Image (spheres, coloured by chain):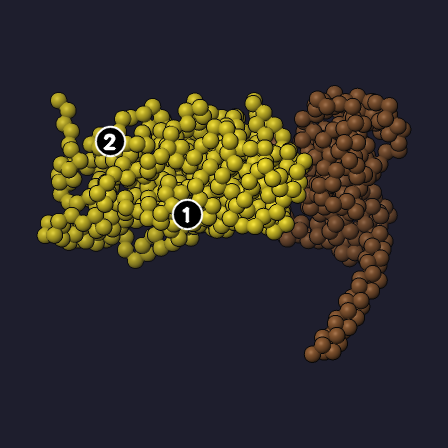
Amino acid sequence: MSFKLTRREMIEQLGGGLGVVGLAGLFASVSRSELHAAGLGGNYAGPALPGKAKHVIMLYMNGGPSQIDMFDPKPALFKYAGQRPSAVDLRTERTTAGLMPSPFEFKRYGRNGVEVSELLPQLASVIDDVCVIRSMYTFNPTHTPGRALFHTGSVLATRPSMGSWVTYGLGSENENLPAFVALGNAAGGGPQNRSGFLPTEYQGVGFAVADPDPEKIIPNLRNKNLDAAAQRTDMDALLDLNQSHSKSFGADRFLEGRIKSMESAYRMQFEALNLFDIRKEPESIREEYGTGAFGNGCLLARRLVEAGVRYINVDYPGGQIWDDHRDVNDNLRKRCPDMDQAAAALIRDLKRRGLLDETLVVWGGEFGRTPVSESGSGRDHNPYGFTMFVAGGGFKGGIAYGSTDEFGFKAEQNRVSIHDLHATLLNQLGMDHTKLTYRYAGRDFRLTDVFGEVVKDILV
Amino acid sequence: MFRYSIRYSIAFAFATLCMLCAAVVRLPAAQEDAKSRKTVRDPVYTAAQAERGKQVYEANCISCHLADLDGSANPTAGARGAPLAGTRFVQDFGESKLSALFNKMKRDMPSGRPGTLTDEQYLDAATYVLQKNGFPAGSAELTAEVAESTWIPGAGGAEGLQNYTFVSAVGCLYQDPTRSWLLTHAEGLKQTEPAVAAAASGSSDGRAASATPAAAAAASGEPGEFTFRLLDAISYKPEPHNGHKVRVTGHMVRLGAEIRVNVASLQMVSTSCGN
């Protein structure tokens, strides 16, 4: 006879509020598998889909990288260089001039001859594991709402990020670490890591990674004044007070979130400093990723996946840096090498370790850029047609899916909205995007709102 | 009021005239400077120095930039150093002083331990890079002072042409180890009309056309000194003409100091490319 606790019973038997659940891993009174069996690992209640992915690494290029110079070759731009053909509406939010061809060379790579720019030789070398989606489109041409759409599926500044939805749905694989981690710019908050109306425990924990020293990545993590036993005594005393408070006044989800954060920080002392120390990687691996902030971030992301972290957002460093309103060619030549190196190394390394099948590596920005020039040497925002790629997690490799028009302005064939992509990613994580819901303010919310279709053509 | 405006107008016209005169006087001088300046085509290092530089390179640089100096341009090698030869070298360092290369090496290299070599070693390594890029050796060694007064030339071959001008050129078709198609030993680019180019090529199906009488005249020309990277050459099925002398038309495009041609037609004019 099997004995199965309900979620509520488990919480009650543990003798406290939700915050106590976090202690289970430490006290080992309830194993992780038992927690999952009891339904505490996640809140997704829909049918289990066959998707086998367990982790997501989102490589976020803040500002909107130029698809025309990287993934979407458009030779026709030369024929009309400097012109604005009257038959095509090329208007965007700013004043732009004529069509501006890319000066970069595209070659065919991999078994299917996917065209990739000379800017990305390393990604080109792993293209057989990459699904390039050239027909992405979104609904807003401005950074802040565009970023929110990209990460949360909504332009509103209050909605939870995809990382929060995924960890809310699937829970954690390692109670001693946050399930959702944001590396880079997101250390300061934003749609990359915000939990919105979801419980605070699903918020992404932000870390800056420019310096690989774990004491700098997680400052003040180690308590220099109290040893583990003394800290435990303090935490238990605090827990008693909180339990008394709960009995007197009822459950408070903000208090529970705070308790969980404190428990999480306490436990991280013993695992995180070791895990976050990428300097312990062999020199050859660090060389492969590169030793800049983005290389560090990608390498740390792989280590976090190995440790069971569910969702990692890695921001390319430098804020809104892919926003090339001027000097796009020079900027890309400076910026692409370390991005290319680290992103390709991540895919290669995950594959070597047998982790690529269970990890979705997603690359992109909030929109792309125009085929027409701005300021003489730059490109304006373009939400109408741009490129993203996904590697691993059951996505087909070595394909370029969809296309834009002959100038690379609007997605034309096999269009994929940001909601379609979110739906497809959730599908590969085993969740039906229409069933991953959270009741708030009187109605059920979804990451995909009322939109989104799973793009089956790009799945294995 | 009226007289006041006229006085100002005269003053403004006079000032404009002076500025124009100054520009006219300065322009030839600037052009003369560009022509007479010392470049790495004038021998600025010795063969022995380049040999020492090779040893420095092999000990400190080769793991990232590779033996052929093609670095990250060679996607199969997995190297991460910037290419130090060919068109990318021209992009990055063309129209710069040689000291820019020297200072860059000194400031950032070797990767992970910058500044750990001596000035002499950095200079020697720079001369090896020059040698690998085909710049000649002479009788005097390169010094930091000489590097400060010596220029690395840009690609050339497109003087006076605006970006995206439709051009033609004759040269040798060559696929480099990174599978890029180049037009080497080419004459300078000449502006042409797309319609004229299409008629001369005699092909409209996108394939590289074989020699026509109109093109044959170009076959006898002397080899030029320029190299242009060809964009989208693959659409014209260039493989059968690798190593042949070809006439290419297309839109010229500048990338940094490098000149490229986005191919609109490709026509073989001779199966021989000389050397």
In this rendering, the answer to whether B100 lies above or below B57 is below
Q: Quadrant of the C terminus of chain B?
A: top right
Find residue B202 and report its horizontal and vertical position in percent.
78, 23
In this rendering, the answer to whether A386 lies above or below B214 is below
Does the rendering let one see residue B6? Answer: yes
Mark 2 lies on residue = A45
In this rendering, the answer to whether B212 lies above or below A170 is above
Q: Residues within 10 Å of mark 1 (few under 14, many from 20)?
A: many
Element class at badge 1: helix
Q: Circle 2 marks a residue in which chain?
A: A
Q: Which quarter of the figure has residue A67? A: top right
Q: Is residue A40 left or right of residue A374?
A: left
| Display colour for chain A | yellow
Q: Which quarter of the figure has residue A10? A: top left
Does the rendering let one see residue A280? Answer: no
Q: Is residue A1 left or right of residue A455?
A: left
Mark 1 lies on residue = A145
